[in-house]
Image (cartoon, rainbow, N blue to C red):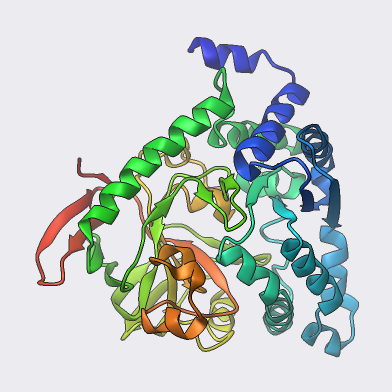
Amino acid sequence: MSNASSSFSALSFEEKLDRLAEVAIHVGLGLKAGQELVLTAPIDALPLVRRITEHAYRAGAKLVTTFFSDDANSVARYQHAPEDSFDYAPTWYYDAIAAAFKSGAARMAITGANPALLKGQDPNRVSRANVAISKAYKPAMELITRHEINWTIVAAATPKWAELVFPGEGEEVALGKLWDAIFHASRITGNDPVAEWRAHGENLKKRVDLLNSKRYHSLRFHTPDGKTDLTVGLADQHLWAGGGTTAGNGVYCQPNIPTEECFTTPHKDRVHGIVTASKPLSHQGTLIENIQCTFENGKIVKATASAGEEALNKLISADAGARQLGEVALVPHHSPIAESGILFWNTLFDENAASHIALGQAYSTCLIGGEKMSSEELASLGANESLIHVDWMIGGPTMNVDGLSADGTSEPLMREGNWCD
């Protein structure tokens, strides 16, 4: 055991939680004095919320406003609410969130809800409720996807989530193991986590700079078993990104804690072939397993899953852009999360264990000058538009990726899940 690991192990749980909160505020958000913070979290994450709130005020936050969710209350809606409830979302709430962002507030989400929360609930109701929320949230989400504000997502271990990740361990043991996994994946176990995060960001930036210098026309993902052979065209004037970013308000932030990915915008009409998920997808409380999709001219023409197939088909029918890609990301199999061998059943972690694609909305900041473009201008370059943005994992130890030039020249980019250089 290294000195840093030994030192971290000696810390109390409260001290470890404090480190995560410090990284969330100073690395994740880069919160500035005078900013408001809008925070959402499951109610089980209250101890972390309190630590984050304390660090936010120490950093000079004007006000921290927290909105809590509760799993039991969420399930009660699907069991007892009238039918017209599922086509409704509180626009007053989402309008207020958008107004807060426009006035300069930062955004933090703490993830940790039960990934299987809505298993057994009516998929049609779940889909309708998600569509209603997506429509209401769109004005605020556009500010996030355009990176107009500084925002980040971090995680808190919760009992039901821990039970799914570590089945049969007992609640206390499972919860402790999940917290340990979160701490390690979130890179807070070293002697100076903030400094080490900055170094990690620099390493990701070097990879991003290399990818941007290549100017690939497309990427080909393929596995020896033939279950994946997918060519993903890249948007005209695409930009690779990874690690931290400077938001439109001038604040440097790390949108995801943890993060291991380099990502860019695909061309919505230039995706062809078959692709098979390498990990299950937990989406809005529904578990979708063994996804396989066929793309033609950018759109999914066939989608299957061994579990949650109805939910998958509802997802890709959310709107016109839901069958097309808005993101493609490369993640080496030797990332800390992949090497842990843990299936988190949570996209924040699982997407940083494997290369992945995302259905739906593209990030405008992954196009040269895209943050200043209209929706029409973005679409003309190949950027997708949708109410949804859902990542699912396709990479792993057998995945090979080639970079293709416009003239068809191919060069190996990743072999057996890892970078070639």
For residue 417, say whether it is visible.
no
- Residue drawn at the location 66% of the way across and 39% of the way down: 24
- Residue drawn at the location 26% of the way across and 44% of the way down: 419
- Which quadrant would residue 409 be assigned to in this image? bottom left
Picture coordinates of residue 28 (x, y %)?
A: 61, 43
Foreground: 207 or 146? 146
Q: Where, quadrant-wise, is the C terminus in this rendering? A: top left
- Which quadrant would residue 223 be assigned to in this image? bottom left
Position of 239 compared to 385: left or right?
left
Picture coordinates of residue 373 (x, y %)?
A: 48, 76
Position of 397 compared to 292: left or right?
left
Question: Vertically, is 100 above or below 196?
Answer: below
Foreground: 146 or 165? 146
Question: Vertically, is 162 above or below 42?
Answer: above
For residue 141, say whether it is visible.
yes
Q: How many dots with numbers?
A: 0
Picture coordinates of residue 308 (x, y %)?
A: 57, 73
Question: Vertically, is 164 above or below 310?
Answer: above
Position of 140 compared to 338: left or right?
right
- Which quadrant would residue 144 be assigned to in this image? bottom right
- Residue drawn at the location 29% of the way across and 55% of the way down: 212
- Residue drawn at the location 75% of the way across and 69% of the way down: 98
Picture coordinates of residue 51 (x, y %)?
A: 80, 34
In the current view of this chain or complex, which residue is farthest to the top?
A: 3
Question: Vertically, is 372 above or below 299?
Answer: above
